[in-house]
Image: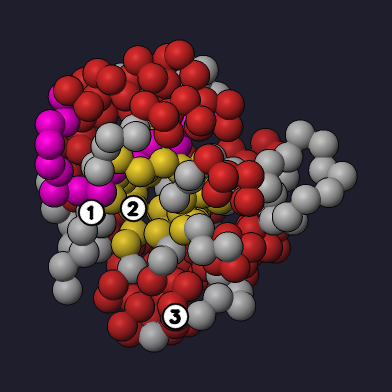
Amino acid sequence: MSRKPIIAANWKMHKGPAEAVEFIEEFDNLIGDSSPVDIVLAPAFVSLPAAKQALVNSDLVQLASQNCHFESHGAFTGEISIGMLQEIGVDYVIIGHSERRSIFGEDDGLINQKAQALHAASVKPIVCIGETLDERDNDQVESVLRRQLTDGLKGLDAANMLETVIAYEPVWAIGTGRTASPEQAQDAHRFTREVIGELFGEDVAARIRIQYGGSVKPGNTAELMSQPDVDGALVGGASLDPVSFSEICKNAG
Ligand code: PEP
């Protein structure tokens, strides 16, 4: 089963509207007219409209938000609804990022509410999962991944899952410069695909795309991507520079 790789840039709390546009203009020149991978940019909320405008003539790059609220409107100060993101033209929303889990206390139940709301609105979630170093050292990788998948994806059906991307991001590899070895990534991806097969059937398991995230750089992309169950990357630090992100996209192809 061939799955088109998907490479996403998570800019976190970097790049306001002007810097986002500057990046896109430079990236556009570097990436050319075609790409063998799907490319997604996830700017901060305030930079989404400017990014969308800068991408108006681009068929290659899609837009993601880094978060959303699951309610359609209401008294949720500081939050952004999925409808508002759709109005801007967002294609994907990242949910369950480990920084949202650990800094903002988001749990699998909340992530599940977001996943369900996104599918109800036909916006594609990128659902992040991954273990901490402590959990890995205590042999809990598989139990953590199984729990995050089972609880985070509850209530979704096979059709929803074909529109979902999973990002396996070991927490100990995010922003640390410490990448999972290709074998560690493959083991976790293979297990993730196996659990998805149990939950949603073998067809979904064979077709769903599973990204790796955690200190991905131009130099380690090709080796990670050569693993049979690694279908792309979610990139933080190395996505902030257009040259480095364009190299990652090229090396992933
Ligand atoms: C991330 O935040 O999703 C991430 C993978 O960050 P980095 O690439 O900087 O490790």
Is residue 18 visible in the rendered image? The answer is yes
- Helix, strand, or loop for circle 2? strand
The answer to whether mark 2 is within 8 Å of ligand 1 is no
Is residue 244 visible in the rendered image? The answer is no
Residue 5: give its label.
Answer: 1
Residues rendered magenta in the picture: 30-44
Report the residue at 32% width, 62% height from top: 209
Please name the amino acid that badge 3 sits on: Ala
Please name the amino acid that badge 1 sits on: Pro
Query: Where, by quadrant of the figure, is residue 2 drawn?
Result: bottom left
- Helix, strand, or loop for circle 3? helix
Q: Identify whether 224 is placed above or below 43.
A: below
Viewer-side label of 3, 2: 3
Marks 1 and 3 in Cβ contact (< 8 Å): no
Q: Earlier in the sequence, mark 3 or mark 2?
A: 3
Query: Where, by quadrant of the figure, is residue 201 drawn?
Result: bottom left
Q: Which residue is mark 3?
A: 158
| Residue 160 position in % (x across, y down) | 47, 73
